[in-house]
Amino acid sequence: MTDDQLTDRVTDRDRRTYRIVSRTGFVAAPTMFFLPLLVPMFSVGYQSWPIICMTAAFAVLVSASSFAAMASTPPDENPGKHQLWAVPVAVFALLPGAVLSSGLYLTVVSLLSQAAATAPG
């Protein structure tokens, strides 16, 4: 086996791994965002960990996008260059993610509290 064939096999394996990681991230991010909205339905009051989980979903989504870009990088380019933009974008995405997550979670908690207060019995 020549060095070029070995390099092609390694590159194909890496790209396949990048695709698997990106698909997993694209499934995990919405799950991490929407599943914690069930927490106030089964617990009493406000908890902070669901908001943290929902906020982290935004960073996971950016990371999944980065891995998808790495998987589609042409063979003659370095796929690692996408990590250069992914890290600052993921950090920047945490601020609006935290605002959206907090607002949505607190809205659900508020609506459930109001429903419990007005329920007969």
Image (cartoon, rainbow, N blue to C red):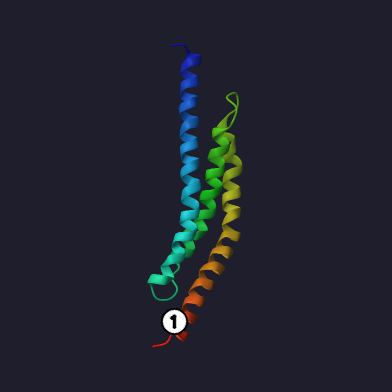
Residue 38's place in the image compared with 1, above or below, is: below
Residue appearing at x 49%, y 64% in the figure: 51
How many numbered dots are placed on residues in this image?
Answer: 1
The answer to whether 47 appears left or right of 83 in the picture is left
In the structure shown, which secondary structural element does the residue marked by tag 1 occupy? helix
Residue appearing at x 55%, y 38% in the figure: 68
Q: Quadrant of the N terminus?
A: top left
In the picture as drawn, the residue positioned furthest to the top comes out as 2
Report the amino acid beneath label 1: Ala
Q: Which residue is mark 1?
A: 116
The answer to whether 76 appears left or right of 13 in the picture is right
Residue 15's place in the image compared with 117, above or below, is: above
Residue appearing at x 44%, y 63% in the figure: 36
Q: Residues within 10 Å of mark 1 (few under 14, many from 20)?
A: few
In the picture as drawn, the residue positioned furthest to the bottom comes out as 121
Q: Quadrant of the C terminus?
A: bottom left
Give percent across and percent down for residue 21.
Answer: 47, 40
Give percent across and percent down for residue 118.
Answer: 47, 85
Residue 91's place in the image compared with 16, above or below, is: below
Give percent across and percent down for residue 57.
Answer: 50, 54
Give percent across and percent down for residue 58.
Answer: 54, 54
